[in-house]
Amino acid sequence: MTESDQRSDNELMLGVRGGDLYALGILFRRHADQVRCLALRMTRDVSTADDIVQETFMRTLQYRHTFMGDARFTTWLYRIARNCVLTHLDRDRSRSSAEQAAGIEGREHLDVHEGAADDARARLELAMNRLPAEQYEVLVLSRYHGLRYHEIAEVCESTVSAIKVRVHRAIKTLRREFQALERLDDRLRSNNR
């Protein structure tokens, strides 16, 4: 391990600002998997998630002058990754909403009939997929990536109180969707008897 490997993320990014591309490589090795996980959860597509990782780090280099070091590097990086995801989703909206709805309905139908809905984890994933985008986003950031409310507010360019409300509503909606899937699963099981 070299001396530069022991620098904090913020120190490394300040180095990138000064032209140290080796520091960017270290940041990539440290955080690419987390960015990929975020992108995968948001886009639900492995290939797209990989593209977003590359785009995120290209933008990290491109916008390095905007990093001031007053916030955590990961918060700044997640904001870039989120913007990359939103850009991708905006481009993806050119597909018809009917085509997208058919894809979601087909996946839910397939999972239920293959018995995956019996598993609480699979049911939770289906319930997550039914959340509105802004609720899904805050749950992914808070529950899967462990960001605090103030960090999520920075990433989403919102207020802490608005994020708290979104998370509360997301959990409430998720619970309702999860219970609806349980009832559907119960009805399907009783009809198959």
Image (spheres, helix red, strand yellow):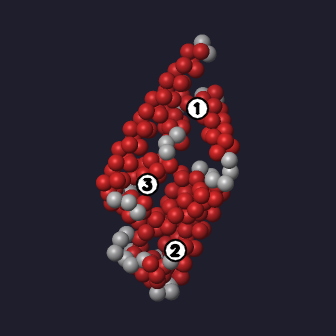
| Dot placed on the residue nearer the N-terminal end, 3 or 1 | 1
| Dot placed on the residue nearer the N-terminal end, 2 or 1 | 2
For mark 3, what is the residue?
A: 141
Which residue does the image show at 41% across and 65% down from the upper left?
75
Cα–Cα span, label 3 and label 1: 25 Å
Front position in the image: 185 or 98: 98
Check the picture and name the quadrant holding the C terminus: top right
Residue 191 horizontal/vertical position (percent): 59, 15
Determine whether 162 is above or below 98 in the image.
below
SS class, disc 1: helix
Front position in the image: 62 or 117: 62
* Amino acid on which the number 1 mark rests in the picture: Ala
| Dot placed on the residue nearer the N-terminal end, 3 or 2 | 2
* Amino acid on which the number 3 mark rests in the picture: Leu
Residue lying at the far left of the rendered structure? 161
Q: Nearer the viewer, mark 2 or mark 1?
A: 2
Residue 100 horizontal/vertical position (percent): 65, 44
Residue 118 horizontal/vertical position (percent): 54, 28
* Pointer 3 with pointer 2, Cβ within 8 A: no
Which residue does the image show at 61% across and 16% down from the upper left?
192
SS class, disc 3: helix
Determine whether 115 is above or below 92 in the image.
above
Which residue does the image show at 55% across and 68% down from the upper left?
56
Task: For label 2, count other residues whose C-alpha is less than 10 Å away and answer few (under 14), some (14-19) or many (20+).
Answer: many
SS class, disc 2: helix
For mark 2, what is the residue?
A: 60
Which residue does the image show at 49% across and 42% down from the upper left?
131
114 to the left or right of 150:
right
* Amino acid on which the number 2 mark rests in the picture: Thr
Cα–Cα span, label 2 and label 1: 39 Å
Cα–Cα span, label 3 and label 2: 19 Å
